[in-house]
Image (cartoon, grey):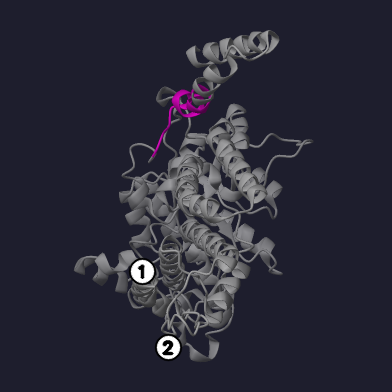
Amino acid sequence: MGQLSAWTHEASACCDPLCTLLQAGCSQGSRPPDQGLVTGVCIAVISGFQCDYSWFLFLFCVFLFTLVWLYVAIIILNDFHNFNEFIFKQRKLWLDWSLVLLIATAVLITYSAVLLVLALCLQLCGQPLKLHWLHKVRHWGARLVLADPLPLPCQATGPFLHIGIVGGMTLLAWPLASFIYRTRNTGLKVFLLLVYCMVMTALYLTPLGITSPCIMEENQLPPKPALVGHRGAPMLAPENTLMSLHKAVDCDVQVFETDVMVSADGVPFLMHDEELLRTTNVQAVFPERAALNSTTFNWTDLQQLDAGSWFLERKPFPTVQSLSAGDRYQATKQRIPSLEQALEAAKQSNISIMFDLRPENHSDYQSFVNATLEVILQSGIPLQQVLWLPDGFREQVKQRAPGVQQVYGRKRLQNEKEPLLHVNLPYQDMSSEEIRQYRQDNISVNLYVVNQPWLFSVLWCSGVSSVTTNACQVLKEMKHPIWLLVSDPFILQPAQCLRHLWVPFCSSPGQPAAWRSETDVLLTKINSLMQE
């Protein structure tokens, strides 16, 4: 009787704080009249531990989902500036939504991790796990939110994901072993052991199927891709300004990528958005015309607009905070540049210029093409430094300016009349195999928009010709991909592990002679594979 009271007192001491944190509440056992146990003490009820382990497994799965979501969040940070621009166009509200995403992700992971750790402590203490209904609802909600994540560039992180999953499955062995030890169902024990062993075997064999462009010998690494400044250097200066062009030149970019529109009086100028609200102070200068298309303004009106102060006010990138006082002052003096000014700056800096001509659905688009071509031909810039992206009236452009390099925003066709020499595509649209095939056929491949070093590294290993980037100052400093893995040790370690496991089993005297003979042949093949 004294021993039972001592045990329940220890169990209560172990469980009560954890139950309080979990909002689980201790189940109150029935009090036998002859024992006098104190109500409210947490008691490990054997009949309910199967349900407890089910909830623990559920918590573990939700935690894995949150890790997947963290992975997705890190991946899509590369493209979040485009999302910020999209929200501004729709709601006229500028906010760095990447911070919202990261904060929400951190809260979700912390919440799930705390519950998982506390649940593990309860299980190891032999105490019942009774989740509060609020935790259950939140976790089911998280599972629904994360059930359909964005496609993941697993080639970039395949080997490291494999290591993480193996580590997670190894940690899962602890509660699984505890469950198997406690359960009385022999069939369930055997089933769980078989499933776990099969999963671990599959994980150990996974490296045989992992393909990544950065699994190669170092002497096979292609040259570093050239950098194309996306609207210049938009992390260091207001986009599509002469300051942005000069900052891009300082980053050793080879091409200045921009967007061209034509004013109402026929002057081509640099502007990405169809409206002027995001990148100028048009709301203050022309409030009644602020929402109109950029092409409805005369060049004299456009020259009155401040095209730089918004950069300091809205801080589209975190790098704005680190600008020097001189750069801040220079940014406030920026005006909308004409295409003629941009061509002159590109000619003096000896870099190429690539541009879109917007908007392509405009009724006067042909006149826009003619005006743009006229400025290019009169600028004196070598035509091979001009990369023409617009598809509209391309044949006319080829006839009037045959030296201009034609860049296509599509993949090549099977019945292509004229072979493509340059393609410009989103990085999601081309696989590593396609990139290598295009390069073998002497087709220059430029992919956009690439801001993160991990993504640049994968494309570097794939052999891409160039990338369009907002972060030229970051990619400029990269002298090598962030990781490069030699293929033989990574792939052959699982085979060597299987060989060591197979030898003592299949070579035992109790095995049939035919089996041992076939095993010898297979082991010989594995040996030769590892020695190649």
Q: Position of residue 135 (x, y in %)?
A: 52, 76
Element class at badge 1: helix
Q: Position of residue 219 (x, y in %)?
A: 41, 23
- The residue that mark 2 highlights is 284
Element class at badge 2: helix
The answer to whether residue 145 is above or below residue 345 is below
Question: N-terminal of the two: label 1 or label 2?
Answer: 1
Please, what is the dominant secondary structure of the magenta stretch? helix
Q: Is residue 388 visible?
A: no
User: Which residue does the image show at 68% across and 68% down from the upper left?
Assistant: 364
Q: Position of residue 280 (x, y in %)?
A: 43, 77
Type of the residue with mark 1: Gln
The answer to whether residue 121 is above or below residue 395 is below
- The residue that mark 1 highlights is 3
- Please state the extent of the stretch shown in magenta in the rendering: 483-496
Does 487 lie within the magenta span? yes
